[in-house]
Image (cartoon, rainbow, N blue to C red):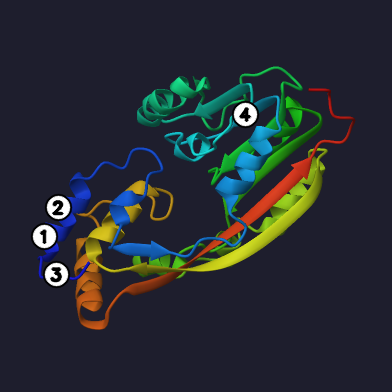
């Protein structure tokens, strides 16, 4: 978006916009991000179509799960943030899916071996022992996750240089090791580094309000000097470029799959 709106106008618009769910349509024309090459939503949908009982963890507003043309006969989603629970319920109940309010750090409120497919897109944290517990023998966990140092050009613009243990905290190899430690077999692991462009300061503000773990405690007031400086940089030099990192992990619970 190229216009002559002021810093105040752009920030006010972004600060007033809803950040519920995982709908990123607000960024149209204002920010872009390359898509990973593996097509998570399509691959998830293929697995859902062949599952008998499926669980989507940290579903957000349910948008990604609802994009699947066919859901498993029993499809359940969990979400911990109340506005997203309401949004996901409205979207998924008409599809016959059940939405369960469950804090992200709490044990999953389901019986052992309840699901033959567990999915999750961008979980804040992966509780591998719980995933292994609720998967039936032969069941699959399929997840796209945020990788190491994702969008750290933006993070470090506001927070300064981060220590190596923070930059490498979401290493896909560590995720694979944790999956195996929980008794799962990793059958697929892919990584991608993807270009992001922020074309106005409003896009930056909206992104940091929506993806709250990037700059913890972010507010416009607390970061106004850096925001103004970045606004001027974008205005004078063009889009602010960062790089997101993603990985796709598929893990299987050993054993013979149950009959459908």
Based on the displayed image, in which of its 4 quarters is residue 49 positioned?
top right
Residue at 48% from the left image edge and 65% from the top image edge:
34
Q: Residue furthest top?
A: 111
Instruction: Give the residue number, with chain letter if any, for mark 1.
Output: 8
> Is residue 218 visible to the viewer in this orientation of the structure?
no
Q: Earlier in the sequence, mark 1 or mark 3?
A: 3
Disc number at residue 3? Answer: 3
Quadrant where the N terminus sits is bottom left
Q: Is residue 250 above or below residue 241?
A: above
Instruction: Give the residue number, with chain letter if any, for mark 2.
Output: 12
Q: CA distance from mark 3 to mark 4?
A: 44 Å
Q: Earlier in the sequence, mark 2 or mark 4?
A: 2
Q: Which of 138/163 is in front?
A: 138
Q: Are marks 1 and 4 in contact (CB under 8 Å)?
A: no
Q: Nearer the viewer, mark 2 or mark 4?
A: 4
Q: Are marks 1 and 2 in contact (CB under 8 Å)?
A: yes
Considering the numbered disc 2 on the image, is that residue within a helix, a strand or a loop?
A: helix
Disc number at residue 55? Answer: 4
- Residue 29 x, y percent position in the rendering: 28, 62
């Amino acid at each position: 978006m190229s216009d002559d709106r002021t810093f105040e106008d752009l920030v006010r618009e972004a600060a007033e916009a809803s950040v519920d769910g995982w709908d990123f349509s607000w960024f149209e024309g204002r920010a872009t991000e390359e898509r990973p090459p593996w097509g998570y939503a399509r691959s998830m949908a293929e697995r859902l179509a062949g599952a008998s009982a499926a669980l989507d963890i940290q579903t957000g507003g349910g948008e990604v799960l609802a994009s699947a043309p066919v859901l498993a006969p029993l499809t359940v989603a969990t979400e911990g943030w109340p506005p997203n629970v309401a949004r996901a319920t409205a979207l998924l109940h008409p599809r016959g899916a059940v939405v369960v309010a469950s804090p992200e750090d709490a044990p999953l409120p389901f019986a052992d071996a309840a699901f033959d497919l567990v999915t999750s897109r961008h979980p804040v944290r992966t509780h591998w022992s719980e995933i292994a517990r609720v998967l039936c023998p032969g069941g699959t966990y399929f997840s796209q996750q945020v990788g190491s140092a994702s969008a750290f050009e933006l993070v470090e613009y506001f927070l300064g240089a981060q220590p190596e243990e923070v930059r490498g905290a979401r290493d896909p190899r560590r995720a694979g090791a944790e999956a195996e430690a929980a008794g799962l077999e990793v059958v697929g692991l892919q990584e991608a580094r993807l270009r992001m462009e922020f074309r106005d300061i409003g896009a930056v503000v909206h992104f940091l309000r929506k993806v709250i773990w990037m700059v913890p405690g972010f507010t416009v007031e607390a970061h106004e000097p850096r925001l103004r400086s970045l606004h001027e940089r974008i205005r004078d030099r063009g889009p602010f470029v960062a790089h997101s990192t993603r990985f796709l992990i598929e893990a299987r619970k050993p054993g013979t799959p149950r009959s459908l």
